[in-house]
Image (cartoon, rainbow, N blue to C red):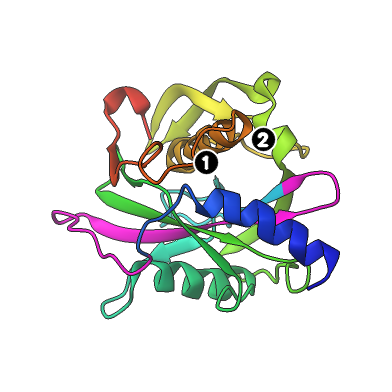
């Protein structure tokens, strides 16, 4: 194991200690459409990075043009994180089969659409981390964790969804002309940042001190 692998393994293991969810667990979605996404991280020399995509413009896609994680609809016979891996391969050509599975964040039930979203977290090395875009994705890009955590980028932003306009919590990511990060993906990112804050504080060393709830149900005020 080289120095890069040792550094990645150490950081990934610390994060995985907080994400002890079963990757095979299929939730009871109460009739909602189950989708699964992948939050993918990699360690660079001086920072960690998160992979985001921008969905291609399409009139049938309610998230057309939005910033998101790779992922999509669960198919019968799949396990939850199997869906995230398949969709990641289909959308951006990154194979997560041999990468570090770190665990799952809390599932999220959306407010404006009947969806139930599971998020599987993966750590990957630099080899094989270059996205190859499908027609479903207009862009894929790595963002430094320090930029995502920068509170100067967190603000209320006007957004439009389903012919309605809202003002919502959002993150303005680096990149000229990019839409803000908001909605369910924003909520998943904030979950992840809260876990990292626990690591920074030296908390989260026992199995039960920081257990995530299995489900977060957004209310209308979340507008996600």
Q: Tell which of 73 and 105 is nearer to you.
A: 105
Residue at image coords 31%, 74%: 75
Disc 1 marks which residue? 192
Q: CA distance from mark 1 to mark 2?
A: 11 Å
Q: Which residues are magenta?
A: 23-48
Percent x, y for residue 53? 62, 54
Q: Which mark is residue 16?
A: none
Percent x, y for residue 213? 30, 41
51 to 99, vertically: above or below: above
- As drawn, which residue projects farthest toward the left? 30
Secondary structure of the residue carrying tag 2 is: helix
Residue at image coords 63%, 32%: 200
Percent x, y for residue 114? 24, 48
201 to 23, vertically: above or below: above
Can you tell which quarter of the image residue 90 is in? bottom right
In magenta segment, residue 24: yes
15 to 73, vertically: above or below: above
Disc 2 marks which residue? 148
Q: Residues within 10 Å of mark 1 (few under 14, many from 20)?
A: some
Check the picture and name the quadrant holding the C terminus: top left
Q: Are marks 1 and 2 in contact (CB under 8 Å)?
A: no
Can you tell which quarter of the image residue 215 is in? top left
1 or 2: tag closer to the N-terminus:
2
């Amino acid at each position: 194991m080289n120095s890069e692998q040792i550094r990645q393994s150490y950081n990934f293991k610390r994060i995985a200690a907080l994400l002890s969810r079963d990757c095979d667990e299929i939730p009871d979605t109460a009739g909602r459409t189950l989708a699964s996404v992948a939050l993918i991280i990699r360690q660079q020399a001086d920072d960690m990075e998160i992979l985001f995509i921008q969905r291609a413009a399409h009139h049938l896609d309610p998230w057309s043009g939005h910033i998101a994680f790779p992922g999509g609809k669960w198919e019968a016979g799949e396990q939850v994180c199997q869906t995230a891996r398949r969709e990641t391969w289909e959308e951006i050509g990154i194979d997560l089969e041999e990468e570090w599975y770190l665990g799952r964040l809390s599932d999220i039930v959306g407010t404006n659409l009947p969806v139930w979203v599971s998020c599987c977290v993966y750590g990957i090395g630099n080899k094989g981390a270059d996205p190859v875009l499908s027609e479903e994705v207009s862009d894929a890009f790595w963002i430094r964790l320090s930029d995502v955590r920068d509170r100067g980028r967190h603000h209320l932003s006007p957004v439009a969804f389903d012919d309605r306009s809202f003002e919502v919590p959002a993150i303005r990511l680096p990149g000229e002309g990019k839409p803000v990060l908001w909605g369910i993906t924003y909520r998943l990112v904030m979950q992840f940042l809260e876990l990292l804050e626990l690591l920074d504080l030296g908390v989260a060393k026992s199995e039960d001190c920081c257990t995530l709830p299995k489900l977060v149900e957004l209310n209308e005020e979340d507008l996600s």
